[in-house]
Structures are given as C-alpha cells and as structure tokens.
C-alpha cells in the first residue's frame, strides 16, 4: 500500500514538474493562459502630453498608458512607467537604461538611425493651435509670426521647414504645456503640435477661446511607435503583442474609452 501511494505521489510530482505548474501564470487578454516571466520593464515617457500621457495627481494616465499596459501584459511583462521628460527619453533609451519609451513618439527616418520602433499604433499629424480670432489659416501663414513648439518634436521640424532652421521667431519649450502657456499669455501667435493634443486642449478649455487650423499640405501623416534601444529583443515580442491586441479587440476597447470612436486598425496595419 505504502509503495503504491509513493508511486502515485512521484507520478504527480513529475507531472507537475513537466507541465511547469507552480510558475506564475496569468490569463492574458486573449483568454488563453500565458506565462508571465515576471520581468519588470523600465518604461519612460514625458507626461506632459494629454490625452496620451499626463499627470493626474502623481499618477501617470492617458491613452499611451493604457495601451502600453495592455501590450506589456500580452507580452508577459510587468511595467514600471516613469516620466523623465522628452529629451531624456532619448538619452535613457540610447544608454539602454530604459527598456521601452512610449510618448506619442513619431517614427521617422532620422530617429530610426538611432533607435528601433515597434509597428505603428497611432496615426497623427501636426496642426496649428491659435486664438479663436486669429487670421492664420495655413502653414504658410505662420511666416512673420512667433510660433511656440516643443523642442525636438516633429512640430519643431515642421515649423523649421516653413520658417527656416533656427529662425528667431521659433520659440522652443521643454514640454508642450509650456508652449501652450506661451500662446495663452500672448508671447506667441500659434503652437504647432500633434492634432489629438491640440484638439483635446481646445475641447477641454473652452474658456481659453482657441481653435485648431489644419493644413495637410504643410504637415505630413505620422505614425506613433514604441521606441527601443537599437537591437533590442523586445521589438519582435512587442510587435506580436500589439498585433494580438489589434486582433482580440483590446486596442479598440482602449481607443474607444479615450476617443469615443472606433479606431481604423487597417490603416495602422497597412
Ligand atoms: N509626435 C511628436 C514627435 O514625436 C510629438 C511627441 C511629443 N510627446 C510628448 N510626450 N511630449 O515628435
């Protein structure tokens, strides 16, 4: 009798070993069981860019935050998100002190030389934020005006294309909120930044009497991507996870929560 129960015990124990029970398991968004390898990633952002990433008290919230949490969970990682500021994001990733950056970062050829990017996860374009009574109706009409931008963004780059590099009329700020403050206090006639950001600002601050001017001739379509140190193994894992949450509806759920409409996933995947 003793012999038999020992045998049963040994069989069960070896079965547990083989199946890997006892390790952390997590139910993923796809409903299938997935292993969490428990590794925590250091993820950096610049939480001054509502509705993508901003502070609510000392908590970082936004579309990007919900998105990266869903993607990381899908890929089996824990997230430690830190707001380090815009320029430092690039320094941290280049120095491999951070694993991933998410910050409404546009993927472009120049950045691709120094960093790796995930598949696209958001479509954007720059637009012009001006007072309601402004005469500015296009990118060309920014000439002769003082324009506020966030340093090192595609907004700065677009304005430089129109006014000239290092033009004296371009005022550069460390974050986009400071650029908007400059506009509000009359130190600039316009801010150029990502459409969703300026559109949300106008919607949420009706008392400021601002409007948004678009100009698809002056400003290109852009795609946001997750940014990794060059050669990072995380890229392929995260690409898979992004595609998984496109397929299983999680991306659409998050998108709808923030923007109230369905995303155009086909454009992102094209
Ligand atoms: N999409 C623009 C760029 O990549 C602006 C992003 C600014 N993001 C931020 N969190 N401040 O240049």
Image (cartoon, rainbow, N blue to C red):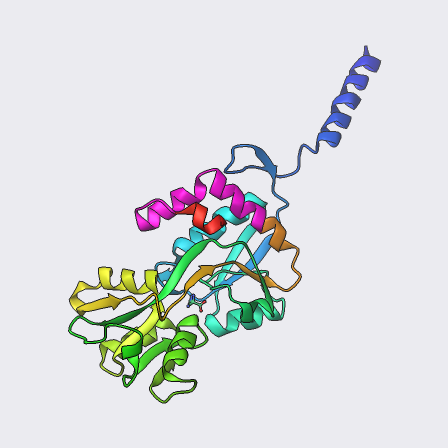
| Location of residue 199 (image quadrant) | bottom left
Taking the image as four quarters, which one is ligand 1 found in?
bottom left
Taking the spot 30% from the left edge, 77% from the top edge, the residue there is 140
Taking the spot 84% from the left edge, 14% from the top edge, the residue there is 3
Asked if one can make out residue 77 in the rendered structure from this viewpoint, the answer is: no
Left or right of residue 54, residue 246 in this image: right
Overall secondary structure of the magenta section: helix
Farthest residue toward the right?
3
Taking the spot 45% from the left edge, 63% from the top edge, the residue there is 103
Above or below — where is 7 with respect to 186? Answer: above
Q: Nearer the viewer, residue 111 or 54?
A: 111
Asked if one can make out residue 92 in the rendered structure from this viewpoint, the answer is: yes
Taking the spot 61% from the left edge, 55% from the top edge, the residue there is 235
Above or below — where is 72 with respect to 27? Answer: below
Expressed as whole percent of the image width and height from the top left, the position of residue 240 reads 58, 46
Left or right of residue 64, residue 260 in this image: left
Q: Is residue 50 magenta?
A: no
Q: Is residue 243 magenta?
A: yes
Residue stretch in magenta:
239-263
| Location of residue 49 (image quadrant) | bottom left
């Amino acid at each position: 009798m003793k012999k038999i129960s020992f045998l049963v015990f040994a069989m069960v124990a070896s079965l547990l070993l083989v199946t890997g029970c006892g390790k952390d398991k997590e139910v993923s968004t796809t409903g299938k069981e997935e292993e969490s390898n428990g590794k925590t990633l250091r993820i950096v952002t610049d939480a001054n860019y509502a509705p993508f990433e901003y502070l609510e008290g000392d908590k970082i919230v936004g579309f990007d935050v919900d998105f990266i949490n869903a993607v990381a969970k899908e890929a089996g990682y824990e997230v430690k998100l830190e707001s380090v500021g815009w320029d430092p994001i690039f320094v941290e990733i280049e120095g491999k002190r951070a694993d991933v950056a998410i910050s409404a970062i546009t993927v472009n050829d120049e950045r691709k030389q120094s960093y790796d990017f995930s598949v696209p996860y958001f479509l954007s374009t720059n637009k012009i934020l001006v007072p309601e009574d402004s005469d500015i109706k296009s990118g060309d009409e920014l000439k002769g005006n003082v324009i506020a931008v966030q340093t090192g963004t595609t907004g700065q780059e677009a304005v430089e294309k129109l006014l000239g590099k290092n033009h004296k009329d371009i005022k550069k700020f460390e974050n986009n909120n400071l650029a908007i403050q400059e506009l509000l206090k009359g130190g600039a006639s316009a801010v150029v930044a990502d459409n969703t950001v300026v559109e949300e600002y106008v919607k949420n601050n009706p008392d400021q009497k601002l409007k948004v001017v678009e100009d698809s001739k002056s400003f290109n379509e852009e795609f946001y991507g997750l940014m990794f140190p060059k050669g990072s193994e995380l890229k392929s894992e995260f690409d898979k996870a992004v595609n998984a949450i496109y397929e299983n509806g999680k991306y659409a759920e998050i998108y709808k929560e923030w923007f109230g409409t369905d995303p155009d996933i086909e454009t992102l995947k094209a």
